[in-house]
Image (cartoon, rainbow, N blue to C red):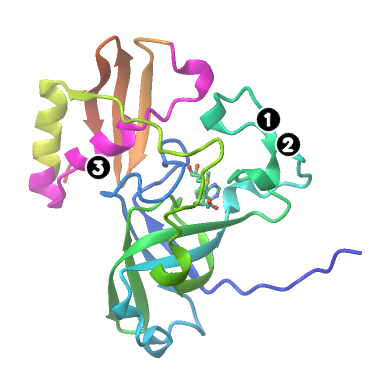
Amino acid sequence: MSKHFQFQQIGIVHSCYKEKFGIPRQPGLVTESSAAIELLPPYNRADTLDGLEGFSHIWVHFVFHQCIQENWKAKVRPPRLGGKKKVGVFASRATHRPNPIGLSVVALNGIRIEGKRVFIDILGIDLLDQTPVLDIKPYLPYADSLPNATGGFAPTPAPLKPVHFTELAQNRINVYKEQYHRDLRPLIEQVIGQDPRPSYLISKLDKKHGNKLWNTNVIWTAKKDGLWITDIEFPEE
Ligand code: SAM
């Protein structure tokens, strides 16, 4: 008889990724991505983080809150295998699992105390905005990094595709930087360079796509010579 455990949500993610489409498959692939984990009461105490500043990376245990589903499947189709071949769910990092729990190692970019609010700034994430956080632990290089480990059907990251910007798109990036003091270009290059399209769309050219990053919608299309950013929509002040 399976046991049921009660977990407490200790934090919530404020992420640059406002929708699942476009989030990389694993952390560390989009180094320009950033988020803040806000600790929730009663865990929003700065002393819970004493000593964490000495670690460059942290493990984040979280809930795939947008994948909560009744049933689970024994086999899944990892995107790395083109969505065709199936592997066992426990041989994958799929989001649809018996317990929708994710595990990501991310770069620690600082700790911020703002009145009663405690934030842990992180970089190189694969976490959707508002992701519930169950636990945070320091990454221990002596125990966690295994240079001789083998990677099965996912030995290396998928290659980045060339990303080009139309003049209009570059002008929009310049306006956005003036208004919001954030250079979107490197983040867009890394996110769209992952080619977030589902495998069945990968060969389709000239179809319009949109990715919500921060408070923008990045419009792009695939051409023969790569992925073209054609416009960037955002609220003008
Ligand atoms: N690194 C984690 C792991 O291995 O457990 C996550 C890997 S999973 C393949 C990464 C994907 O999870 C992202 O591309 C995104 O589509 C999805 N994701 C991220 N946060 C999510 C959330 N809160 N709810 C549902 N899906 C989420």
Viewer-proximal residue among 74 and 100: 74
Quadrant position of residue 73? top right
Name, please, the residue furthest toward the front.
148
Residue 187, disc: 3
Across and down, in percent, residue 82 comes to 54, 24
Q: How many marks?
A: 3
Proximity of marks 1 and 2: CB atoms separated by less than 8 Å = yes
Q: CA distance from mark 3 to mark 1?
A: 31 Å
The N terminus - image quarter: bottom right
Across and down, in percent, residue 223 comes to 29, 12
Q: CA distance from mark 3 to mark 2?
A: 33 Å
Closer to the N terminus: mark 3 or mark 2? 2
Q: Which residue is mark 1?
A: 86
Viewer-proximal residue among 70 and 226: 226
* Residue at image coords 36%, 78%: 118
Across and down, in percent, residue 190 comes to 28, 38
- Magenta highlight range: 177-203
At label 2, which amino acid type do we have? Lys
Q: Which residue is mark 2?
A: 75
Few, some or many C-alpha atoms within 10 Å of disc 2 (few <14, some 14-19, many ≥20)? some
Quadrant position of residue 13? bottom left
Q: Which structural element holds mark 2?
A: strand
Quadrant position of residue 123? bottom left
Q: Please check the rendered image and state whether residue 185 is part of the magenta-colored stretch, yes or no.
A: yes
Instruction: Name above or below for residue 197 compared with residue 211.
Output: above
